[in-house]
Image: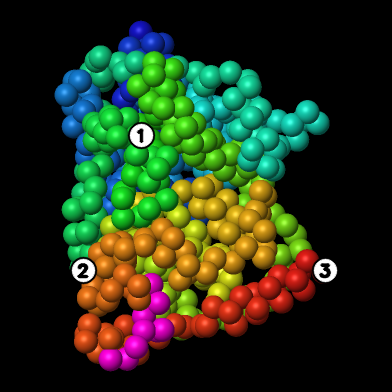
Amino acid sequence: MSTRLVWLRRDLRIADNPALSAAHAAGGPPILLYVLDPEGEGCGAPGAAARWWLHGSLAALASEVARRGGTLLHRRGPAERIVPEIAREAGAACVHWNAVAEPDARRTEERVAGALGRLGIASEIGSADTLYAPGSVLAKAGTPFQVFTAFWRAARASGLPEAPLAAPACLAAPAGLAQGETLDSLALLPRRPDWAAGLRTAWTPGEAPARARLARFLDEADRYAAERDRPAAEAGSRLSPHLRFGEISVRTVFHAVHGAMAEGRLAREPAERFLAELGWRDFARHLLTAFPSLGDAPLKSAFAAFPWREDRAGLEAWRRGRTGYPIVDAGMRELWRTGFMHNRVRMIAASFLVKHLLVNWREGAAWFLDTLVDADLASNAINWQWVAGCGTDAAPYFRIFNPVLQGEKLDGEGTYVRRWVPELTRLPARWVHRPFEADPELLAGCGVRLGETYPLPLVEHRAARERALAAFARVKAG
C-alpha cells in the first residue's frame, strides 16, 4: 500500500474533502501537510485578521486529526519546494490537493506539479471550494456568464451539486516523518500589540464550530428572509469565514439548506435566497478563473481612466469609522473590532468610499482583505467592482447610496449604530443617523459635540453625489 500526501490549502476539514478522501481510498491513511506560503498565494494570501483565524483553524484541525490517530505537519516557505521535499522524504507515490481559483495559487499548483513530476511523483487535484467546478457553467456560446442571474439559472438547471463525502474514520499516518515546525512557529497571531481580543470574543474557528453554526442557522433560518437586511438582528448565517478557510464545504451547506427546504423544515423563500448567496460565491470564483486580473483591474476597461481622487485623510477617516455618517462608521468599527461587517453595511461603506469620496476601489478592497476574517480574493474583488460600477453584473453608476436614508431604513431605532458608535448612544432615534442636522442644544444634552466627540461629515451627500455622477458620466461618454 503506497503512502499518499495531502497538501491542505483552503480545505481545513476532514469531512467532504475530495483530496483527503481520494488519498485515503487509494493508499490508506495519508500524511497531512499545511504549507504557509504567502508569496505563492500572492494577492490571495491571508491578511492580518485572516491569519488570526488561520491559526485557530489549524489548531482545531490538528486536534481533530490527532483524535483520528494522525498528525498534521506544518511548514513555512515556498510550496513548490516544500511539498516535493516532504513527498520524497515520506516516499509518497502521489500528492493530492484541492484546487484554488486564485491566479497566483494556480501558478503555484503548476510549479508544484512540475517539481513532483520531475521526481516521478504523481499529483491528483480535486475540487472542494465551489458548488460547480469553474468553467463548467457556460453560456451557449461557450463563454463565461457575466450576469449572475443567468449564471445561477444555468447552474441550477445543470442539476444539484455533488453530495458531500463522508469523513475518513482513521488518519493514522506512517510513523517516522519529522514533525518539523510547530503551529506557533508560523507566527500567525498578533503579538505586540495583541489587537485580536474582539475576534476571540466573536468567533471560534474550526470544523466543529462551523457545523454547529450551520445547525443554528437552520434552526433560525425563517428569520433570514425577514431580517437579513437588518444589521442589528444578526440574522445571517455567519458561515462565511468558515467557508473561506474550508472548515465546512459549500456543498455541505448547500445540501443542508436544500434538504431542509425539500423536507418542509425550511420555507422556500429564505432557503432560495440563501442558496443564491452561495451561488454568488461560486459566481465570483468562476469569474476569477475566467478573468485572472479581476482582483486588480476593472473588467470594464473604460474605468482604467476613471478620475479617482487621492484623499489619504478621507481614506484614513473611513478606515477608522470617522466619516461623520453613523451607519458607515458603525460598520467600519464593527469590522475593526470583530473582523466582520454585515453584508448590507459593507455595500453602504464601500459605496461611500468610491462614490462619496471618489477613492479608488482598490484601496477599499485592500483594506477589506486585511481586516475581514472572511476575506478572499474572488468575493472581495467581485463585490468591490460591483459597487464601483466597473465589474460584471455591476451596480448602475447612478446608484449612489444615501448613508442617512440607508441607516434609517436598515437600523430605524439606531440599535446597530449605538452598539458601535457609543458617543451617539443618548441621541433619539430621529437623529442618530443624522446628528449633523440635530439642534445644538439637543446634541449638547446628549453629550455630543460635533467635530470633537463625533466628527462632522467628510462630505455633504448632495454635493458628493453630483461630483460622482459627473465623474461617472465622463467615463461613460468615453
Q: Residue at x 65, y 79 (%)?
A: 467
| Foreground disc of the pair 3, 2 | 3
Using the numbered discs, state the Cα–Cα distance from disc 2 to disc 1 in whole angstroms: 41 Å
- Name above or below for residue 336 compared with residue 84: below
| Residue that badge 3 annotates | 478
Nearer the observer, 457 or 280: 457
List x then y, in percent, for residue 257: 40, 26
Q: Is residue 10 above or below residue 77?
A: above
**Relative to 129, residue 175 above or below:** above
Q: Secondary structure at mark 2?
A: loop
Q: Which mark is residue 222?
A: 1
State yes or no: residue 439 in magenta. Answer: yes
Magenta range:
433-441
Mark 2 sits on what residue? 193
Q: Residue 288: x and y, percent? A: 60, 44
Residue at the top extreme, as displayed: 1
From this view, report whether residue 376 is shown above or below residue 180. below
Residue 257: mark = none
Of 428 and 62, the residue lying toward us: 428
Q: How many marks?
A: 3
Along the line of sight, which residue is nearer the eye, 289 or 90? Answer: 289
Q: Give the SS element for disc 1.
A: helix
Q: Quadrant of residue 97?
A: top left
What colour scheme was applied to this rendering of the protein? rainbow
